[in-house]
Amino acid sequence: MILLQYIVKLFLCSGLLFGYYWLFLRNKQFHRYNRFYLLATVLVSLVFPFINIPLFISNTSSETPVFIQVIQSVTTITTLKHSFSLTELFNWQNTLLFIYVTGIAILFIALIKSLLYIHRIRLHYTAEKLDDLSLYHTNEQGTPFSFFKSIFWNKQISFRSREGQQIFRHELFHVRQQHSLDNLFIEAATCFAWFNPLFYLIKKELKAIHEFLADQYAVSDNDRYAYAELLVMESIRTKQHSLTHPFFNTQIKRRIAMITQFKNKKYGYWSRVMALPVAILLFCSFVITIKTKLNDRKENPYTEVQRSLIKNIRYPAKALAENKQGEIIVSFVITKNGSISNTSLLTEDYFGMGDE
């Protein structure tokens, strides 16, 4: 039940926050804001369901309690020899747990394969040092791309040409802004919550925003159309790895639209500001739980057993609701699992109630 509640809250958090992004923030030119918004969406969706902050409200009710006199308490505890059964192993809880762990394992293996691919390229080619940057001239499919402080270049692209310099500036921006760290975070989150389809959409959007930011850095107002032409003419379909930033990718249409648009600083201001009330609403809905605090413990002298009895016996609950007073004598049995059973009324009180 706890796991199910967590999954429901995870879906609701990610759905509401990503829905707001899709309606009001997507394809707008405040890419830095959108980058951190999407990262915060993933973090909030994972963390908020775990947090529980109780908010106590004082109880000012003048309710008169119904006292319970316990005259018999029998504890039945037996030790039985437990025999292993396959039906206990293959129940629905263990089946769901197996499916969940299998999904994590598959995605984790894919992540390791991407890391091993990058490591293999580093071992196969010699790096050229540019300050703290490592530049690898390769013949690998999918290059050029960057990963942390390494840029993997394609030898077929002239490094000294205007196009080559624009591509290099693009990949250099990925390195300087630590976009690979974003990718590792979203990949780890997707491994943990692989059942949430919204995380895959967030990962796709985050990669697109990385490209928008790097494109803006790579071009100037005078050669933006030449840069857009470069994307169209040299765009090729290549095998891409989830952790890297290939220069030629499938987001060409959106990248060209972002490059050729002129900035409007006023446009979208309120859509960014209104994201804060949405986050506060989520915090209050999923994190804060309201509980009643008793003003005077002497007016409510119930033990945990008595509270359970009051909850399970129909007439005392009705008496409490009607603010009446009386005394009830009950008999009950505490079973081996700690639950209360065989509850019965032994005497009649002034309500005129007999045995249940």
Image (tube, rainbow, N blue to C red):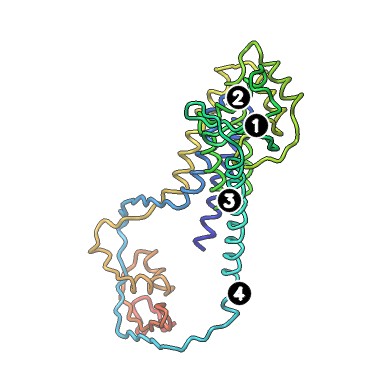
Q: Nearer the viewer, mark 4 or mark 2?
A: 2
Q: Earlier in the sequence, mark 1 or mark 4?
A: 4
Which amino acid does the dot numbered 4 rest on?
Phe
Q: Amino acid at mark 2?
A: Phe
User: Is disc 1 in contact with disc 4, using a CB cutoff of under 8 Å?
Assistant: no
Tag 2 residue: 168
Between the residue at mark 3 and the residue at mark 2, the CA separation in whole angstroms equals 27 Å
Q: Position of residue 94 (x, y in %)?
A: 57, 69
Badge 1 marks a residue whose secondary structure is loop
- The number of numbered discs placed on residues in the rendered structure image is 4
Would you say the residues marked 3 and 2 are in contact, meaning their CB atoms lie under 8 Å apart? no
Q: Quadrant of residue 240?
A: top right
Kindly identify the residue that appears in the image at 31 percent across and 69 percent down. 325
Residue 281 position within the rendered picture, expressed as x and y whole percent measured from the top left: 48, 40
Residue bearing the label numbered 1: 144
Instruction: Read off the residue under disc 3.
Output: 112
Q: Badge 2: how crowded within 10 Å, few (<14), some, or many (20+)?
A: many
The Cα atoms of the two marked residues, 3 and 4, are separated by 30 Å
Give the distance between the C-alpha atoms of the residues marked 1 and 4, in whole angstroms: 49 Å
Q: Earlier in the sequence, mark 3 or mark 1?
A: 3
Q: Secondary structure at mark 3?
A: helix
Tell me if label 1 and label 2 are in contact, CB under 8 Å.
yes
Q: Amino acid at mark 3?
A: Ile
Identity, as a three-letter code, of the amino acid under mark 1: Pro
SS label for mark 4: loop
- Up-down relation of residue 210 to residue 344 (above or below): above
| Disc with the residue nearer the chain's start (3 vs 2) | 3
Tell me, yes or no, if residue 229 can be seen here. yes
